[in-house]
Image (cartoon, grey):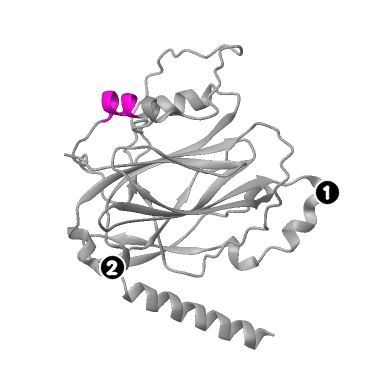
């Protein structure tokens, strides 16, 4: 059995190296876009008749990991902020496209990537271009805001495209993570494969025992733009606090720059906005 596992490991490493060689660094010369994502969990309790397949998470492939911009240590001066009242709630079972366009046109900031943030680098500032929708989601009784990510990157052609790992982190016992593959041809496109992981109950401990141990420490690659190399990066423990992937969403869609797209599943989803800075 150990010999079989060894050969499987060698094969998977070879597959990763082969796929890595297929990526051409010429994509660094492509037009740069900004990508904004909001992760959402659907809260409405309904007796769904649909039977969902058990999700299968595959990390044995090449994918990029987003880096994080490191801020220097600064003295923070606290400021007053408003806490919403419990009864201050609104319902948004869906977001109308007319509302999308109006808010985006009024508030979208098309700008060059701010120095010194690099491509494929997250910034923890609260400057997501969908901030208004995030505020609506936080006040909704139908949705729960799970997290957000924003970064800049060139978008290559489909033949030269690659997957990027996205992650919401943990929010009240839930976590959404997976992969996004943006690419362009005549139009913008994106493949999305994400998973909703939930904190299991005491009577569901058997689920954890059946998990593949290789999933617990997956590895991706950081892009070194200056040296034009890929550096291995171990992802954080995706099953901490007994979080188990329960549902899977996989979809491919044509996009339009500056328009919000909702990739939805009866249990969760994400809002995706791709814009081209001036």
The quadrant where residue 42 appears? top right
Where is mark 2, residue-wise? Answer: 229
Question: How far is disc 1 from disc 2 in space, using C-alphas?
Answer: 46 Å
Q: Nearer the viewer, mark 1 or mark 2?
A: 1
Q: Residue furthest right?
A: 203
Which image quadrant: the C terminus? top left
Q: Secondary structure at mark 2?
A: strand
Q: Is residue 43 left or right of residue 25?
A: right
**Residue that appears at 56% across and 16% down:** 89
**Residue that appears at 69% across and 50% down:** 242
**Residue that appears at 36% across and 33% down:** 128
Q: Is residue 194 left or right of residue 70?
A: right
Query: Pointer 2: residues within 10 angstroms few (<14), some, or many (20+)?
Result: few
* Magenta segment: 101-108
Where is mark 1, residue-wise? Answer: 203
Above or below 60: residue 244: above
Above or below 4: residue 63: above
Residue 209, position as x, y percentages in the image: 75, 62
Above or below 19: residue 71: above
Residue 223, position as x, y percentages in the image: 31, 61
Q: Nearer the viewer, residue 227 or 262?
A: 262
């Amino acid at each position: 059995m150990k010999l079989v596992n060894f050969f499987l490991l060698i094969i998977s490493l070879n597959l990763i190296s082969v796929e890595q060689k297929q990526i051409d660094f010429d994509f660094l010369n492509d037009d740069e876009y900004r990508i904004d994502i909001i992760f959402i969990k659907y809260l409405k309790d309904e007796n769904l008749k649909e039977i969902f397949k058990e999700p299968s998470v595959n990390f044995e492939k090449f994918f990029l990991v987003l880096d994080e911009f490191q801020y220097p240590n600064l003295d923070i001066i606290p400021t007053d902020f408003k806490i919403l009242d419990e009864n201050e709630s609104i319902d948004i079972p869906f977001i109308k496209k007319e509302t999308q366009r109006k808010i985006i046109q009024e508030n979208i900031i098309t700008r060059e990537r701010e120095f010194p943030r690099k491509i494929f680098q997250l910034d923890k500032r609260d400057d997501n271009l969908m901030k208004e929708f995030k505020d609506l989601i936080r006040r909704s009784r139908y949705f729960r805001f799970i997290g957000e990510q924003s970064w800049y990157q060139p978008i290559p052609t489909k033949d030269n495209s690659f997957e990027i790992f996205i992650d919401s982190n943990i929010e009240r016992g839930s976590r959404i993570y997976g992969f996004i593959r943006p690419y362009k041809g005549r139009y913008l496109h994106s493949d999305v494969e994400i998973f909703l992981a939930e904190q299991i109950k005491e009577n569901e401990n058997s689920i954890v025992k059946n998990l593949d141990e290789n999933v617990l420490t997956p590895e991706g690659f950081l892009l070194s733009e200056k040296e034009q190399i890929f550096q291995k990066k171990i992802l954080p423990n995706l099953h901490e606090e007994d979080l188990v992937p329960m549902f899977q969403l996989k979809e491919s869609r044509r996009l339009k720059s500056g328009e919000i797209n909702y990739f939805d599943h009866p249990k969760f989803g994400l809002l995706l906005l791709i814009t081209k800075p001036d």
